Image: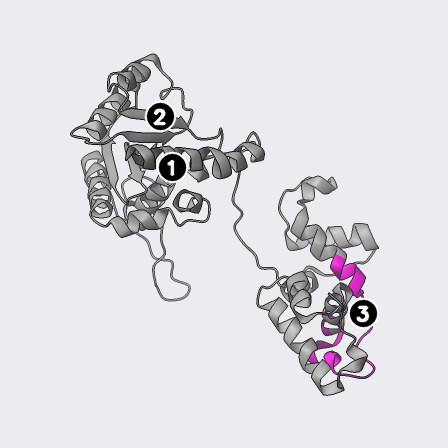
Amino acid sequence: MKKLDGRKIGAEAMEQIRVRAVQRVQQGESPEKVIATLGFSRACIYNWLARYRAGGWHALRSGRPSGRPKKLSGRQIAWIYKTISDKDPLQLKFSFALWTRNMVTRLIRKQFNLKLSESSVGRLLHQMGFSCQKPLYRAYQQDPEAVEHWKKTVFPGIKKRAKKLGATIYFEDESGIRSDFHAGTTWAPKGQTPVIKVTGARFSTNMVAAVSTRGHLRFMVHQGTVTATVICDFLKRLMHNAQQPIFLIWDRHPTHRSKKVRQCIESFGGKLEVYWLPSYSPELNPTEQVWRSVKNHAVGRKSVFGPDQLKSAVTGCLRRLQKIPKIVLAFFRHPECSYALH
């Protein structure tokens, strides 16, 4: 598409375009997307950001820009944006993995021999549309190609076969929760940190659960190690009175691959089919969202004083989820799990 020429647009209109473009970037849109929708050359948006950074909104007016001289040019800002978007510090031979203000300051000093304060870098990041976020962590052993193959080829094949046989697809997982896990915040007068009394003892309980693409939740709470015997017990409960085949998707935990579990699966005469998630990819399992709900929105906000109370709290939370299929289906709409609904 032919790029627009700002010289052929009125001065007042260009001022409005520049201001609106910078505002959109500050609201979180990528500079590349903003300038593409406006039809100007890629360099324009970074020049406008550089002008705004040097002199504020006044500097975006038509005519000769005023204000202090620019420390960073539009070309340099474009490089910074692309580098932070596409790479992490480790790829640039830094020893830290997160883009902090200090790390971006060091990047600018290394690349352009310019010294900026961390507060100045913070403003720059905001002006480029970046926000400070808690990153998602992935095991370095994870194979991205295997994950993509699972989403685009393997799971659609499973879904197609399930539809043909009238089978229900379940995702299974296990997790544990300890008495010293706490979540949530509370209101209190400024400067007066509230104190919540809890037990000093440590105890835990384990959970086994499976969620289906139809909004079903099946679970079992167990105090003790989740062994092959426990998994077999759960599978028997899952298959009890099942009129149609069940396709079970889970990870490659050694317990799942044990001889006892394999024999248990075979005992159902083909009514239970098992499929394996890609290695080191727990985020692909919607049941992970069940654990997050139990830990962060229920048990983690309670004062628990004994093993029985912990087990009761966990069981109560899972039973409430079980009665509301809409919430269970909402777990599948998590960005990492939405592939299962498509």
Mark 1 lies on a secondary structure that is helix
Residue labelled with disc 3: 70
Which image quarter: residue 121? Answer: bottom right
Given contact means CB atoms under 8 Å apart, are the residues at marks 3 and 1 in contact?
Answer: no
Identify the residue at image location x=80%, y=50%. Answer: 110
Check if residue 65 falls in the magenta segment.
yes
Q: Which kind of residue does numbered mark 1 sit on?
A: Lys
Neighbourhood count class around disc 1 (C-alpha, 10 Å): few under 14, some 14–19, many 20 upward:
some
Residue 247, position in %: x, y?
A: 32, 30
- Front label number (1 vs 2): 1
Mark 3 lies on a secondary structure that is loop
Distance from label 3 to label 1 (Cα)?
56 Å
State left or right for residue 125 relative to residue 310: right
Identify the residue at image location x=74%, y=70%. Answer: 40
- Front label number (3 vs 1): 1
Sooner in the amino-acid sequence: mark 1 or mark 2: 1
Q: Which kind of residue does numbered mark 2 sit on?
A: Val
Residue labelled with disc 2: 274
- Whether residue 317 is visible: yes
